[in-house]
Image (cartoon, rainbow, N blue to C red):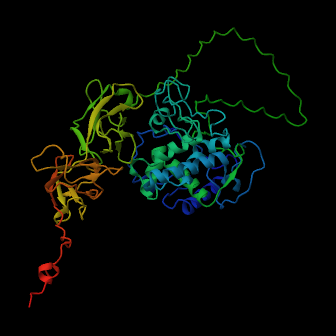
Amino acid sequence: MAAHIGRRLRKGAVTTAVAAAAVAALSASQAPEVVADGQERQSAADAQGTPDPTAADPGATGNSPYYTDLPPLNSPTPVPSTTVGPTPGTGTGTSQAGIPATVLDAYQRAASELAASKPGCNLPWQLLAAIGQVESGQARGGRVTADGTTVSPILGPVLNGVGFAHIKDTDHGAYDGDATYDRAIGPLQFIPSTWAWAGRDGNADGKADPNNVYDAALAAGHYLCRNGWDLSVEADLKKAILSYNYSQDYLHTVRSWMEFYRRGTHEIPDGSGSLPGNRSDDHETPMSPSVPVTPSPAPRPSKPGGTTKPSTPATPSKPGTPSTPSKPTPTPTPTPTPTDTVAHLEDAGTATLSARAGDTFTDRISTRAETSAGKPVAKVRIRFTIVGDTDATFAGGESHATVVTDAKGVALAPALRAGEKTGDFTVRALLVGRAVTAVDYTATVTARAADALTRTGDAALTCTAGGAFADRVEVKATYKGAPAGKVAATATLLASADATAAADKGPYFKDASGKPVRTLTGLETDAKGLLKLPELFADDTTGTFVLRVTTTGGATLTVELTVTAPASSTPTPSDSPSPAQSPAASESPSA
């Protein structure tokens, strides 16, 4: 990031004593975890305990300059603006609490989407607003079109290593118009290499544009919510902000604005916001060294009433020797960065990558950066990207992860979590900031499986011909003793245990139209590994049959089904006359 030559709380508006008091009050009331000294810098107490991210990682912005103005000490009061267009350097009153309507909507919409997709992050929209204020003065006071695109591009300085980070071009000038070096772009100041993986389409127009505040706000939300961070936890909040721009001053400034907006804000018309007056690359003196000028001696005053002695004519000087032209000052040569020394990337001992659907991969990807001499290169960024038709993600739900190499030149990617899609996919490791050959890793997701099946009940399954079985069959699938959820299963009705094909008579299930079926596919256990089969019916065939249930992974269960003949019915009375009514019985013997 830019070297800090000097910072001013308000340009020409407050004294050093007032600035110190303002910062101390803000530190106490708005960011209790941040401690400031009298020169508006972070003290050593605050500088500790933030090892991740590191200064070697230029973060979202390339550690570009940012606005350093702090919010007013008083709580914000809604005061609608009557001016049209941004007014530079006038943001010292309560009107600073106003946020341009489209910009405010973008922050709130992004936070709402993150609340649904990553509820564990607990992203407050006020954090996005604070970063937007510090990075671009809320898109230059809300100078955006109706769809949220900035009226003119917002570009940071050229990151050529002279006074700023050294980041060579990564987008061929597509975003920032510079094919030699990168520049931060848009209202939330993403560098192109970060936007390449963090960019989002926040306004559903089919493209991710860093110059659009809806796209940029959603991208910033996902960027701050990566790595499984919970922004309601102080330590994670610090890591997230520092990952955006690695500076303790930046952390303090963003926290101050976030707390200010939390105490109240209001909507103002687009284009009517005020622009901050000070930036972290402002300097009290010119950056380039100046030649000291020796002042001429002041003329002596003449004595009162005295006469002036006529001056002696000057003796003509001899023609001087022409001076030698001074050599032009050479342009400073950027100091080579660790990234410049990387010759290649290689695998650092990654094992076979395989996991069942829904599981976390046991092994993690490890990539090493080396010089042409084979020496490890520390503190360079390796970006891991998941490629292919897969729903696998890194921890935190992202398909990209950027990791800084350690002292051994090794970057260890976050753990991979398999999705529900089975098959192979690729994880690609790329060096950020320089074109070297990528390293590809193949990962495989296998189907969920069970290695055992049991019935949940033990009642005998019997039925009379032409009837329905009283109990439905329920089974439980397990894998290594644990419930096996979401495992595919098949149920088949067989004539005997030795049969391999479904029976053509005997017990049956019914399909949606009520027709008999004796094979059910596409079944799946629930989260607890349970599967309850549909009701079973019997045709007129009696005997003993078999229900076989199988799952992915080879688990098999055989259940015996018995169909009996209907009980015989009671005979109906005969129409023939009873013995008492027969003629022989009714005739009396003759006397």
The answer to whether residue 73 is visible is: yes
Does residue 273 sit above or below 426 in this rendering?
below
Q: Residue at x 39, y 51 (%)?
A: 228
The answer to whether residue 359 is visible is: no
Does residue 474 sit above or below 150 in this rendering?
below
Q: Residue furthest bottom?
A: 591
Q: Quadrant of residue 434?
A: top left
- Seen from the viewer's position, the closer of residues 213 and 409 is 213
Place of residue 195 in the rendered image (x, y in percent of width and height, measured from the top left): 48, 36
Place of residue 166 in the rendered image (x, y in percent of width and height, measured from the top left): 46, 31
Q: In which quarter of the image is residue 393?
A: top left
Q: Residue furthest right?
A: 305
Place of residue 463 in the rendered image (x, y in percent of width and height, measured from the top left): 20, 62
Q: In which quarter of the image is residue 308?
A: top right
Report the side of 236 relative to 419 (left or right): right
Q: Which residue is drawn at 17% across and 67% down?
A: 567
| Quarter of the figure with the C terminus | bottom left
- Seen from the viewer's position, the closer of residues 524 and 572 is 572
Does residue 189 sit above or below 170 in this rendering?
below
Does residue 211 sit above or below 559 in this rendering?
above
Place of residue 18 in the rendered image (x, y in percent of width and height, measured from the top left): 65, 56
